[in-house]
Image (cartoon, grey):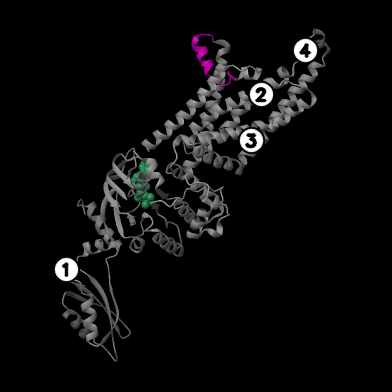
Amino acid sequence: MSIGNIWILCKKELKSYFASPIAYGLMAFFALVCGYFFYAATAIFVVRSTDPMMAQRGMPMDVTEWVIRPVLMNASVLGLFMIPMITMRLFAEEKRSGTIELLATSPIRDIEIILGKWLAAVLLYVCILAVSAIDLSILFIYGKPEVKPLLVGYLGLLLQGSCLLAIGTFISNTTRHQLVAGAATFAVCLLLWVLDWVSAYDSTPTGRVISYLSVMGHFENFAKGVLDSKDVIYYLSVIFFGLFLTTRSMEYLRWRA
Amino acid sequence: MIKVEGLTKRYARNVAVDNISFEVEKGQIVGFLGPNGAGKTTTMRVLTCFLPPTEGKAQVAGFDVMTQAMEVKRRIGYLPETPPLYPEMEVSEYIEFVGRLKGLPRAGLLKRVDEVCERCNVADVKSKLISKLSKGYRQRVGLASAIIHNPDVLILDEPTAGLDPEQRRETLSLIKELAGEHTIILSTHILPEVEQTCQRVIIISKGKLVATDTVENLNSRLRGAELVAVEVEPRNGHLAQEVVQQKLEQVPGVSRVLFREQRNSRLLFEVESLQGRSIRGDLARAVVQADWNLTELHPIGLSLEEIFIQLTSSTEKGGSK
Ligand SMILES: Nc1ncnc2c1ncn2[C@@H]1O[C@H](COP(=O)(O)OP(=O)(O)OP(=O)(O)O)[C@@H](O)[C@H]1O
Ligand SMILES: [Mg+2]
């Protein structure tokens, strides 16, 4: 496996993201919606913290708990909508236009193609997340929020995004229709999200396993600013699994064709 | 350079390529000929390691396409039926990208890009977006990117499809120039193209190999006898058709003389030789000795078209070659 080859693919993929309106559209969408969440959370925080009732009870209001956490939780849900749009074209478009023939007949490995494309998707996701730094800078101008939970929260968003992007990459490799890939990725992301609901009413071992599989369930700790190796390992293994499945499916499709 | 043995490729239901074998020597330019759906693209995809063969073996430059795919891919330049272009890239950017994919180092790559752009006549659109190019230019950009890493073997799938006659001629002469340095396989269903460009033909139909031979051999193999067009003009005055015909019939080796037409005072005949005899020299001498002008003398080959029809229809009837 050569880093050089991965980077060649990744650069090409990033360029094509930024040559189309997708990248800018998603960044604008995220900036707007995230900005709104931030505004709403801050407004609630301000109203509550000036509420004499709360002050009387002597409960110090915490920016991390009242602003950052809800914004992070909402941002992670926004990922559900953005990730299918990022990954749907990765392979489907190459298959439709026939450029996959160029990649597949060049002296590069499947895994290099896959990693290059996935990495480009991750980097685009990082750019999108970075847009919300504008909102956060306001927090730093007017106050001194804790840095560590913020960093942990963003690490969580990145890990969660990377793992859904790996799944999206796999799905894009199974079809030549972008829209099919996008819709299927959205469905799978949604499913992985709602798995978490099971934990609310089912505490049997099965229920716990199901909720363990939920991508969203593992994000809660990150949003609280808690870095748990269990969650990190979960995300890393889903990324690995998704990319591994993609290599398998490339191989399988070649033989079946 | 290329060696295919008993290659079979089955898709889910149908057999696209059925047990074909052939060899291509280094520096040769070979035409891959067959009607739609014959299995040309499929064979090329196996040779370029895009598809694994169902059965049989294929070797390129001494490397097996199955077990040594990386080595094969390094030595192959492939232009698929639709050139694999990224519309959002500029021409030189695209060719550079392909060069990097093929493993060329960054140093000197830009110079190499300029070289192939010159060579394939795309230098004037180098900084244009590929999405803004015409079909002919796209084809040439595809060709330029296929030779960027100076591959031993070039595999071109219908390189002239969709081009106007002028561009078609240019592309073919470019391909001809490339032969020698590269071993080339090109597929087409246009027969005169093969006659003009290729040294050898491989004809397939419905996945089966129909014939593989040099262009000349194929011609004579089917005909056996030589067919020559002869045009004769009197030095002065009038020339009777019967006189000339008689004279030509007396030339040794001639089996039949056919009067074709009269153009002003010139008379055109078609002369057929006996099996395996070469008669052109004797014909020319006979005409000149009779004190006439020999205004035209050339062999009329059976066109590949006719060969093709004969060969493919004979396999359909169940006979081989
Ligand atoms: N991906 C595929 N799946 C199933 N069948 C296929 C596939 N690709 C080609 N075929 C079938 O294999 C046969 C050979 O096709 P191929 O594309 O190799 O022909 P071709 O000689 O290149 O034809 P053309 O001159 O039209 O390009 C055809 O019958 C075609 O229907
Ligand atoms: Mg074809």
Image disc number at residue A211: none
Three-letter code, disc 2: Leu
**For the point 83% across and 12% down, which residue is it?**
A52
- Which-is-in-front pick, marks 3 and 2? 2
Whether residue B192 appears in this view of the structure is yes
User: Residue at left 28%, top 51%?
Assistant: B23
Real-space Cα separation, disc 4 to disc 1, in angstroms: 110 Å
Q: Chain of mark 2?
A: A
Rounded to the nearest whole Å, what is the CA distance between mark 3 and mark 1?
77 Å
Q: Position of residue A136 (x, y in %)?
A: 73, 27
Q: Nearer the viewer, mark 4 or mark 3?
A: 4
Q: Tell me which segment is drawn in magenta.
A: A203-218
Q: Who comes first in sequence, dot 4 or dot 2?
A: 4
| Residue beneath disc 1 | B275
Badge nearest the viewer, 4 or 1: 4
Quadrant in which the C terminus of chain B is drawn: bottom left
Q: Is residue B144 left or right of residue A221?
A: left
Residue type indicated by callout 1: Gln
Q: Amino acid at mark 3?
A: Leu
Which amino acid does the dot numbered 4 rest on? Pro
Label placed on residue A26: 3
